[in-house]
Amino acid sequence: MDLSAIGEPVIVQEDTQVHVGVHLREGTLTLTQNGRDFEAHHALVEFASVDARPWMAEKVKFSAKAADGKSVVLVVDLLNDACDGPRAGLPVAMWKVVALAATSAGDVGITYQAPRGV
């Protein structure tokens, strides 16, 4: 078989998503929704990079337990409505969870910086 090639192959990153799970020590993060407290024990952070732009954290899904022992999933959207920056008013603890997940995801090429002011 004859085979020839010309040019230099280039990988194009169109829309890439990475989900990173982080186990949280019991009792270290309490989430409050509608006046109810939930003890978070796991977080799944979703990162995305569109058209080779920098990685952004899109959302965090927390697995948590209520005081009555029932398990729930709480989803926090991290991007503003225009999807061009962080949602205002999120607690600093959310960004700390994102930073922990980004550190864990370094081996898959994620480089991440927390939004300014966090």
Image (tube, rainbow, N blue to C red):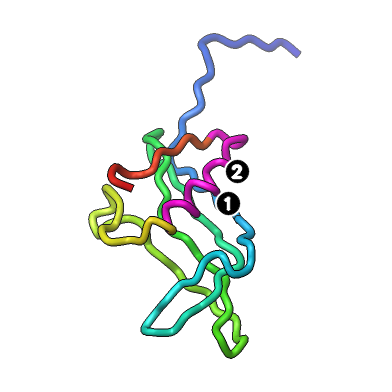
Confirm whether the magenta stretch covers residue 106: yes
- 40 on left or right of 89: right
Q: Earlier in the sequence, mark 1 or mark 2?
A: 1
Label 2, secondary structure: give it.
Answer: helix
- Dominant secondary structure, magenta: helix
Which residue lies under the disc numbered 2? 104
Q: Residue at x 50, y 65 (%)?
A: 61
Residue 108, image x, y percentages: 59, 37
Q: Which residue is nearer to you in this view: 12 or 89?
A: 89
Q: Amino acid at mark 1?
A: Val
Which residue lies under the disc numbered 1? 20
Q: Residue at x 47, y 60 (%)?
A: 60
Range of residues picked out in magenta: 94-109
Q: Nearer the viewer, mark 1 or mark 2?
A: 2
Label 1, secondary structure: give it.
Answer: strand
Q: Relative to 13, is 58 above or below? A: below
Residue 20, image x, y percentages: 58, 51
Q: Quadrant of residue 56?
A: top left
Quadrant of the rendering where the N terminus is positioned: top right
